[in-house]
Amino acid sequence: ALLLACTLGTLGSPALSSSVGARRGGVRAGSAGALRSSFRARCAARRNMDATTSLRRHATPATQVVRRRVGGRAGVSSGEGRSLIEEEEREKAGLEEGKYRWDEYGVDIHYLVKKAQSTEDDAGSSSSPVLFLPGFGVGSFQFTSVMQEMGDDRDVFSFDWLGQGKSWPSDSEGLQFSSDLWVEQAATFIEDVIKKPVFLAGNSLGGYLGALLAARHPHLVKGVAMYNATPFWAFRPSADDDEAEAGAGRAGQQPQNALLARLFSTVWDGVLPAPKPYKEFASNLFDALRDEANVRRLLGLVYSSGTEAVLSRSFVKEIIDSAAHPEGPNAYASIVFSPKANIGFGEALEKGVQNGVSYLMVYGREDPWVVPLWGQRAYLRLRMAEQQQQQQHGDLQRVSYCELTPAGHCPHHEAPRTVGKVTEGWIRSMEREGREEEEQGGQHVTAGQVSTSTEIEKEQQQQQQKDDGQRSFPPLHREHGLMKERDGRQVRIQPIGDGVSPRNVGEWMGTLFLRQRARELLEKS
């Protein structure tokens, strides 16, 4: 039952056919305990990094960034096993492929980038880059359409997580493949490749990891757009929890989760290589999940009706090809049994707001996994933290939430034009507000400047009515809440506010306490 529960915890994205694997570069000898301690120490050091730490503006000598055009342009050879359809689609989107050498792990990270035609927006200011974060089992190939919809005045990136897409190591020995590693990967990629703070946009697991990254490294993140972000990942207690429980036991105290700690103390913790029973279990399940018929069946369950056209043969082939790597079964075993992050999803969202990070939530309403209830819970958690922040610092509203229909678990892939336009508009809104705050120098929140504050607010409202990039999604309002996709499908968008009423008993029960707390904070403010 425990193995089944842990496995089900990994089924939080549409691409169940793939797995994850990575290699601890240069670590081939020593005990599992030494490997585990080394990995935890590095993750803890990253989590404790000062939020004001400046970005590394250059790569280390061992770090290499190689970028090239796809589709045979600029003397680039096509990738191994890549279809002509895939090449043509990416060439039309103006995307380039790149490989970034992550020397610490001895792995080449594959990524796609759409370079800006100009790095300045209409106002003459530098536009912020965007980094798309894939869900579990897929890769950057799922974002090709939505990347095309982003503005031409900003750089847009998407990479493959270690062990997904084309970011595979030759050997995964010595690695505990947990969310800590993925967060470290994203932070390093921003520092070494993009080299400036970004807006993150993540689907499913990518949204969850984006929230963790904003909480741990706010100096790298300006905002996070979450597309049906999974609200949890893994079942094993975090490494910090394990150490706290052990410390309590040594001190003669009763651990808070004594039963859970004892249970997991007898279970492998995900540090590769996997013991034989765990490897056999994971390999059998992994082989079943990456079967083409199962891939199509599972994708059909989580994508909304009417979007079957996006599930092309080339897309399914990308997923299956990614899962065919020899390290797939090992990595999948590690991911099933690796521990949680040291903070939960809700706590990460609250810390992000406290750090001044902005949030956009775009959720597909027909998602059978991350149902609207989870989106509303996350939104209320964000709004509660935001209200507290506003009372203390007078910050502007930085949280927006909308639901799309018809759209399921992957709205960025099912409705790329809608999601791209909404995300681009939100980013432009955040950039404009950031410039206004800098120009005003905080005067509108200074004591004795109430009249100035009112005038500024009026000017902001007038400007927002004229600006197509405002956060209230003007292109959608002009079309009465409908956006037409490039294939002719119409997608309805419903902005969700504080006063939205639950639509069923489950939503009412699931958000009852949070709604009461949010109502109290709104009344106080």
Image (cartoon, rainbow, N blue to C red):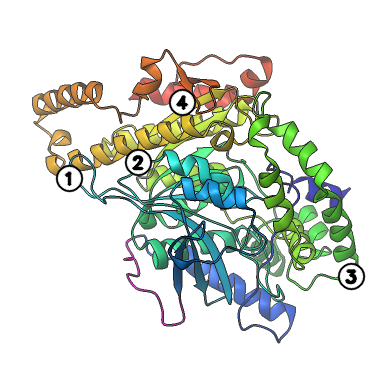
Which sits earlier in the primary sequence, circle 3 or circle 2?
2
Q: Between marks 4 and 2, how big is the CA–CA gap? A: 35 Å
Are the residues at dot 3 and dot 1 in contact (C-beta closer than 8 Å)? no
Residue placed most toward the observer, 102 or 24: 102
In the rendered image, the vertical position of residue 515 relative to residue 437, given as above or below: above
Q: Name the residue beneath numbered marker 2.
A: 151
Which sits earlier in the primary sequence, circle 2 or circle 1?
1
Are the residues at dot 3 and dot 4 in contact (C-beta closer than 8 Å)? no
Q: Between marks 3 and 2, how big is the CA–CA gap? A: 50 Å
Are the residues at dot 3 and dot 2 in contact (C-beta closer than 8 Å)? no
Query: Which amino acid type is shown beneath numbered disc 1?
Result: Gly
Q: Secondary structure at mark 2?
A: loop
The label nearer to you, 3 versus 4, is 3
Q: Is residue 429 left or right of residue 386?
A: left
Which sits earlier in the primary sequence, circle 4 or circle 2?
2
In the rendered image, the vertical position of residue 31 relative to residue 491, given as above or below: below
Q: Between marks 4 and 1, how big is the CA–CA gap? A: 39 Å
Q: Is residue 141 left or right of residue 3?
A: left
Q: Name the residue beneath numbered marker 4.
A: 518
Residue placed most toward the observer, 263 or 158: 158
**Does residue 44 appear in the picture of this structure?**
yes
Q: Name the residue beneath numbered marker 3.
A: 276
Q: Between marks 3 and 4, how big is the CA–CA gap? A: 50 Å
Which sits earlier in the primary sequence, circle 3 or circle 4?
3
Magenta part of the chain: 52-63
